[in-house]
Image: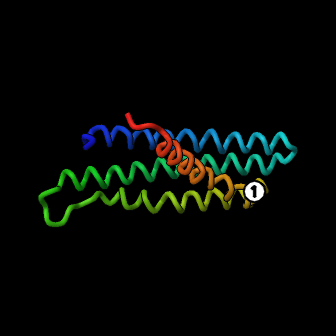
């Protein structure tokens, strides 16, 4: 049986790996597409990747807040979570939607390229998962 501290450490390492893989994979794809002559598409991939990374960081922060609040109130019947946590969990979707709308409307960056950039997070999560599966256990 693996100690809880080791499992938590592995989880944090995987979270960090997903964060930097999101940026590396998305920015690399954006650069390749831009160098291929599709500058607006490349910009859309980079913008979508940056939004996906921000979304991931905010989601991770919100989930960590929920976990800490539930641990701190383990004996109570109805644990209380700060209202700001709920607000920020929902606010991130609104912020991403407004950002994509403004960039699409004013900078004329293709919407599909930004959506593809948002998928960089999923690709990074899959890559990190495959790494964890193939990596020998210490």
Q: Residue furthest bottom?
A: 78
Residue 118, quarter of picture = bottom right
Is 102 left or right of 83, judged from the image as shown? right
Work out which quarter of the rendered image holds the C terminus and state it. top left
Q: How is the image coloured?
A: rainbow
Whole-percent x and y of residue 88?
A: 42, 57
Picture layout, residue 130 above or below residue 106: above
Of residues 48 and 24, the one nearer the viewer is 24
- Quick one: label 1, few (<14), some, or many (20+) residues within 10 Å? few
Across and down, in percent, residue 21 comes to 57, 41
Residue furthest to the left: 75
- Residue farthest top in this picture: 138
Along the line of sight, the residue nearer the viewer: 136 or 104: 136
Place of residue 114 in the rendered image (x, y in percent of width and height, measured from the top left): 69, 55
Q: Look at 66% across and 45% down and name the residue there.
A: 26
Residue 9 sits in which quadrant? top left
* Quadrant assignment for the N terminus: top left
From the image, tell me which residue sits under label 1: 106
* Whole-percent x, y for residue 52 in the image: 57, 51
């Amino acid at each position: 049986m693996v100690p809880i501290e080791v499992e938590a450490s592995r989880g944090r390492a995987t979270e960090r790996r997903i964060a930097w893989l999101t940026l590396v994979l998305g920015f690399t794809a954006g650069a390749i597409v831009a160098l291929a002559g599709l500058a607006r598409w490349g910009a859309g991939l980079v913008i979508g990747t940056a939004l996906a990374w921000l979304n991931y960081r905010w989601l991770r922060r919100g989930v960590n807040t929920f976990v800490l609040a539930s641990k701190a109130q383990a004996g109570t019947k109805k644990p209380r979570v700060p209202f700001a946590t709920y607000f920020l969990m929902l606010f991130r979707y609104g912020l991403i939607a407004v950002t994509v709308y403004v960039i699409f409307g004013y900078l004329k960056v293709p919407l599909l390229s930004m959506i593809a950039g948002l998928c960089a997070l999923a690709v990074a999560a899959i890559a990190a998962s495959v790494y964890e599966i193939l990596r020998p256990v210490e």
